[in-house]
Image (cartoon, helix red, strand yellow):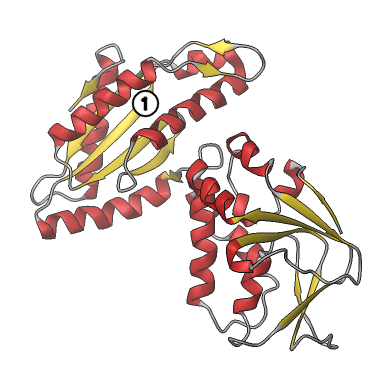
Amino acid sequence: MTHDSLFSTAELETVPLFRFVPMECIEGILAHCTAQELPRGERFEPDGPLDRSLSVLLSGRLALHYDVRETDDPLFLEAGDIIGETFSAGEPGVPCLLVAAEPCRVLVMEEDLIWSLAQASHAAACNLLGILLRRRHDPNREGFAGTAREYALHDQSIVDPLTGFQTRRWLEGVLERQAGRAASSGKPLSLMMIDIDHFRAFNEEHGRIGGDRALHAVAKALRNYLRPTEVVARYGGDTFAILLPETGVATARMIAERLRQRLTNTVIDIHDGRMLPPLTISVGVAEATVGSDSLTLLRGVLDALDAAKASGGNAVSG
């Protein structure tokens, strides 16, 4: 069995755990992971307890046998499947045996790296939670083969692949529920809409790579500054929406102003030796009013955003 720490983008794309995760966000984490190479017929034997690490099948096929002996009717794991999950598929206390049905390559991520991954990438954290919840809600499904691939195809349109944030489609459903909850509880609910100033001209001058790096810079600033209870989505193009539960409009304006100032001081590293100029943003803010619904709140924040842009940009309105 050999070990290395090099993983290609192509093989990681098969893994639901890394779905929509920008590789540059997790390069340092991957550098500390290891890979196990299993020839056909070799048993998979983890270096430590499976609940203290993640083992992901990158290529090949593993046969899963219960009761520690090879049988004629095993279950199979395919590329992209998380190996540790297979042991929850059987009855508690029933020992299992994993054997390479063909040459296999397995990524191993230790516990501390799993936490680092969740902190480094919102998309990876959502992916891991989604995988675990799917297993929890369907504990009696026969076998494991296919689960990861089904998950990879499930609701692809609710996560933005570039930023790792949720999409407009997802946000609209959450906004409706949050607006109803705020109306019944009497607690405040605010919505913020952010638009990058002159983004079309920025794209034309610096190209698609520069535009993508600019969006990464905005996403990183939002991820680092906001609290976990504040929901962020890429509303479309260069527009981001932030839902702030239990937050009044005055506090929302203060948060928006701090974000505007932070981005004004952000320099964008394009990773080819160039440093792009900092961005400015326009921000609209609105608060749900008594008797209003999610559509009313959405129209209010979009009107506020239009007002901020009409003032010349680099401003907060609402």
Report the residue at 87% width, 71% height from top. 101
- Give 79 or 200, whichever is nearer the viewer: 79
**Residue 21 on image: x %, y %:** 58, 43
Total labels drawn: 1
Q: Residue furthest front?
A: 48
Q: Which residue is label 1 attached to?
A: 195
- At numbered mark 1, what does the secondary structure look like: helix, strand or loop? strand
Query: In what quadrant of the picture does the N terminus appear?
Result: bottom right
**Residue 119 on image: x %, y %:** 48, 45
| The quarter of the displayed image where residue 239 is located | top left
In the displayed structure, 197 sits above or below 42; it is above
Q: Amino acid at mark 1?
A: Asp
- Give 43 or 201, whichever is nearer the viewer: 43
User: Left or right: where does residue 127 sit relative to residue 15?
Assistant: left
Report the residue at 24% width, 46% height from top. 295
**Residue 258 on image: x %, y %:** 27, 24
Report the residue at 48% width, 51% height from top. 158
**One can see residue 305 in this view:** no
Report the residue at 40% width, 51% height from top. 170
Query: In what quadrant of the picture does the C terminus appear?
Result: top left
Q: Residue furthest right?
A: 40
| The quarter of the displayed image where residue 233 is located | top left
In the displayed structure, 2 sits above or below 73; it is above
**Residue 199 on image: x %, y %:** 46, 19
In the displayed structure, 43 sits above or below 126; it is below
- Give 267 or 306, whichever is nearer the viewer: 267
**One can see residue 253 in this view:** yes
User: Left or right: where does residue 98 sit relative to residue 264?
Assistant: right
User: Left or right: where does residue 300 sit relative to residue 139?
Assistant: left
- Callout 1: few (<14), some (14-19), or many (20+) C-alpha neighbours within 10 Å? many
